[in-house]
Image (cartoon, rainbow, N blue to C red):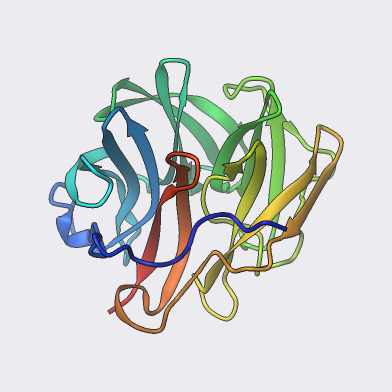
Amino acid sequence: MRAIPVAAFTPANVRNPVQTAADVNDLPNVDTIAHPCMIIKGSRYYMFFTAKYLKTDEGGVGLGQSNNGREWHYRLAVIHEPVMVSTPVVFKCQNDFYMVPETFELTTARLDKATAFPDTWEYQKDLLRGDHFVAPTLVRYKDMWWMFTGVEGNETLRLLYAQDFTGPWTEHPLSPVVKKNRHTAWPAGIPFMLDGEVSRLGMDIVPTYGYQVHAFKIIGLSTKTYVEKMIDTVLVKASGQGWNADAMHHVDAHPIGRSQCIAAGDALGK
């Protein structure tokens, strides 16, 4: 199988990390940023990400900006609420931008809309209720919307589908599509589209959290079927030294041109 064209290397003209927790100046005590999600709009790049104080899990969603995809500066916190809001999945539909962030504490998967992109977002509705949804992740494929979401325990992956991303959402008859597997269940980024095919990203949290990210080519997907196969090459993995020495657990990749892509990943290092 062909590997997703993302390599875990640093181009010569990029100095990693491009954003750190120290850049976040409008949320209190932020010591951790993670889960990048990029939007490319015109000649500008926007990166939404989790920003939090690890000890209490307080924080929100921060936003960075770049004119070239290589050099970034922090812009502002776009979401800051009394409960933890994290892991933003941002997408465009028609002329509007939407976000599905993780709201694990509230037992909901919610939808926000940009009223003034990229800075101002407003809550729209709850897409799902009644469970602790981990990193609910949407992708448009075969004229349908699909949602992958982990649940508490991080060893199970649910799959739902809808005609419209606003719902109603229906549980896939084969859901959960991953059961009792801490190597593959946790969503690790928005599914990657290549030549009309889609690949799911899953975090391996064994032996340690954020150990590496696998890609899974989805070779059969309908409202009745689901078949995936792991791509042999690990997508990203901790390097043992430098900025990504200890962990890499989330990837966001976007094709730019016919043979290139730009990708952002989070990492724990020295």
**Farthest residue in the bottom direction?**
240
**Farthest residue in the top direction?**
95
Q: Position of residue 71 (x, y in %)?
A: 20, 51
Q: Quadrant of the C terminus?
A: bottom left
| Quadrant hosting residue 201 | bottom right
Quick check: 165 left or right of 163? left
Q: Residue at x 37, y 36 (%)?
A: 39
Q: Is residue 235 above or below residue 85?
A: below
Q: Nearer the viewer, residue 171 or 93?
A: 93
Quick check: 139 left or right of 159? left
Q: How many labels, in total?
A: 0
Q: Looking at the image, can residue 80 be seen?
A: no
**Farthest residue in the left direction?**
25
Q: Residue at x 57, y 45 (%)?
A: 192
Q: Position of residue 248 (x, y in %)?
A: 44, 68
Q: Position of residue 149 (x, y in %)?
A: 62, 46
Q: Residue at x 32, y 76 (%)?
A: 269
Q: Position of residue 16 (x, y in %)?
A: 26, 65
Q: Is residue 224 above or below residue 252?
A: above
Q: Nearer the viewer, residue 70 or 164?
A: 70
Q: Nearer the viewer, residue 256 or 133?
A: 256
Q: Residue at x 40, y 45 (%)?
A: 37
Q: Nearer the viewer, residue 170 or 250?
A: 250
Q: Quadrant of the N terminus?
A: bottom right
Q: Looking at the image, can residue 177 be seen?
A: yes
